[in-house]
Amino acid sequence: MYTKTQIQELDTLTTDLLSGKMYFDAAEKTSDLIAVIRYHDWKYYLQSTPSINDQQYDFLFKELKKIETEHPNLVRDDSPTQRIGLALSTDAKTVAHSVPMISLDNSYNADDLKEFDERLQKLLNGEAIQYCVEPKFDGSSIALLYENDKLVRAATRGNGVEGEDITHNARVLKSIPLQANFSKRGISKIELRGEVVIANDVFKKLNEDRAKENLKTFQNSRNTASGSLRMKDPSETANRGLEAFMYQIGYAVDTNNNNVLGESLNNHFENIDMLYTLGFKTPQSEKKICNSIQEVIDFCNQWEAKRDSYNYEIDGMVIKVNKLTQQNKVGATGHHPRWAIAYKFKAKKARTKLLDIEYQVGRTGAITPVAKLEPVPLAGVTISSVSLHNEDFIKEKKLRMNAYVYVERSGDVIPYISGVDESSLDENTQEIIFPKNCPSCNSELVREAEESAWRCINLECIAKSEESIIHFVSKEAMDIDGLGRDIVIRFMKEGLIKQISDIYLLPNKKETILALDGWKEKSYNNLVDGIEASKNKALWRILVGLGIRHVGVIMAKKLAKQISSIFDLQAWTTEQLLELEDIGPKVAESIHQFFSNESNIHLLKELERNGVALVHNELNSEQIANTLAGKTFLFTGTLTKFTRDKAKELVEKNGGTILSGVSAKLSYLVAGAEAGSKLKKAQEIATIQIIDEDDFLKLIE
Ligand code: IVH
């Protein structure tokens, strides 16, 4: 950590270096650049408050590289340029930990924790016990060895006694300092324990990026972290967004080789503070001192409740006796320390039976096998069905009908099968035979080379049309209010729609629709409003809605910016498409194919004829102002000046957000006549401003 004065000095030095400060001494410039880059790594990776942008950081980094190339004698091991060494690692080396990395005993409920406390009370003859409680990170454990302030080795846990040497990879993690001022605290050699993790948002982005590049996506952050630490090429590791939380000191000695753990370092909470001050990432604000076991239990419960909103995967809490003298008194069994225990949250992994497989036809004709499972509770929800992706997945996981499988769920990720219980693969289980024909139209399925999916290629297949229409009206595409999956399926059954453009003929079919069970004037009007509003949706929404392969929301938004009409895409060759920004060969080829197909052009012409705007215009242009940026809105009661869809559009165009319910997050409730419970609820929250339609229009004027 830096003092205020140091921060001021480093900020000034940053400005000087960025504006090309002159140096007469190369060593001085090198040392200034190292200090400044290390400071900005700390701001970015530990404080999450960067004060320079990527280009400025790159400039400083390049300056340092340049000077080091010119003066090789100035290259220091702890220079940020030396995080990635040039050589790839050779075969993994095994190294012995300074002290064994034993694991933790587990507890699952309040009674287990009370027993743990009672055991300790006895062992400590009733001495008062303070506990330090912190999250149990679900990643890959790591041991870092520092000698004379330098990181000299990093190792995996391995079997606890010996681990794998992964120094080359640990060095690329910016949250692991290459140098830390332990000597100032009289420590000359120290081994730290921690967990390498990937934050949930980073993991999500990593997978999105991989999907875009057609690379296999990762299943969970724990395995990805552990795999990434073992890569041969550290520059690969560097791209995985890994971070290391340090939560324990395993071993520490002074210059005379005397143990300082339990001596000068005698308080776990303060030890973690010290690591934080020296530049490590620690569970700094997460950790808490509890003075009674009841306080521990309450704190664990609080964390379990907010587990899903925390940006790191955690599978429980770790409770540690805070005083190291007490820790030393109670000692350890062969397996685990007596002074610590893990409190495990309710499982995010469950074992259940695979009862059946349903084969679903997607809009591209791809067949997705979906497992029907014996319902099983998993981290707060009941799971009874989960996607099996494709035939290869079934084979890879050695799945058989009636076998027992493990289902996992992490963060807000959808549940998935992580494996099969091999002991259940007996004569009661049967081989899974992937269908040869489309479950909807019975035509023969095809699987092209390099494709993982079997596809139905029948252009007339009803299931495909159904999915295409459902996709077109979906939230991420045209977002047509009043027209969801079930209604599309019903309308198709009734023959009211056969293809996408038929949606726009629905307003002429009032009588037929009103004759259907459950349809009333109000739901019909709602549907018509939704359809009308969709005629002027942003062009990227139409592009998404068309379901062109490889064109998702992000790509559609990029494309829409570069065209004035959807028909522009028809005129461009693959080569011309490739010249557009961010469009790769796969996307270009797929767009070209889509627009070379007569029936697709026919569909677009029909849409245009039915009033759907296929060119940018005043009504469908995206956000035009930031007037409402950061503000949230909810509309209630009868609106007379605009429809709800229009209101939503106006809010979004002005940079605001619509909320679905009244909460403290709401900035404005726009109340029309006869507003009911929402208005009442909003009146009870002082921070919500209650306005009418005119006030709203004034806001965006
Ligand atoms: S302390 C002797 N603290 O949980 C005590 N461990 O089964 C050493 N873990 O392999 C462990 N978060 O990888 C400790 N805050 C935390 C932890 C933690 C995760 C992992 C660690 C260990 C396993 C214990």
Image: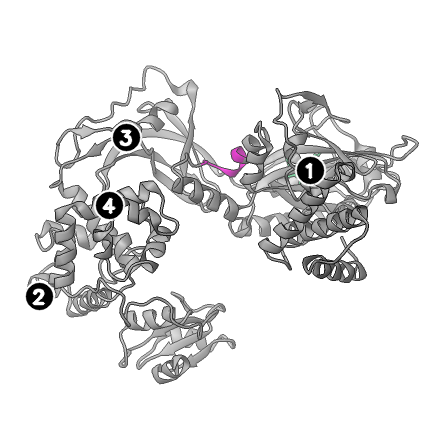
* Numbered mark located on residue 82 in the image: 1
* Numbered mark located on residue 508 in the image: 2
* Nearer the observer, 259 or 117: 259
* Nearer the observer, 410 or 378: 410
- Residue 694 location, x and y as percent? 35, 84
Range drawn in magenta: 218-224
Mark 2 → mark 1, Cα distance in angstroms? 70 Å
Element on which disc 2 rests = helix
Find out whether residue 633 is within the magenta segment.
Answer: no
* Numbered mark located on residue 356 in the image: 3
Left or right of 318 on screen, residue 551: left
* Kind of residue at disc 3: Asp
Sequence-first tag of 1 and 3: 1
- Residue 458 location, x and y as percent? 13, 37
Mark 4 → mark 2, Cα distance in angstroms? 34 Å
Seen at 68% across and 44% down, the residue is 66
- Residue 209 location, x and y as percent? 44, 43
* Kind of residue at disc 2: Asn
Sequence-first tag of 4 and 2: 2
Q: Is residue 104 visible?
A: no
Q: Label 1 crowding class (10 Å Cα cut-off): few <14, some 14-19, many 20+?
A: some
- Residue assigned mark 4: 592
> Quick check: 507 above or below 157?
below
Mark 2 → mark 3, Cα distance in angstroms? 43 Å
User: Which mark is in front, 2 or 1?
Assistant: 1
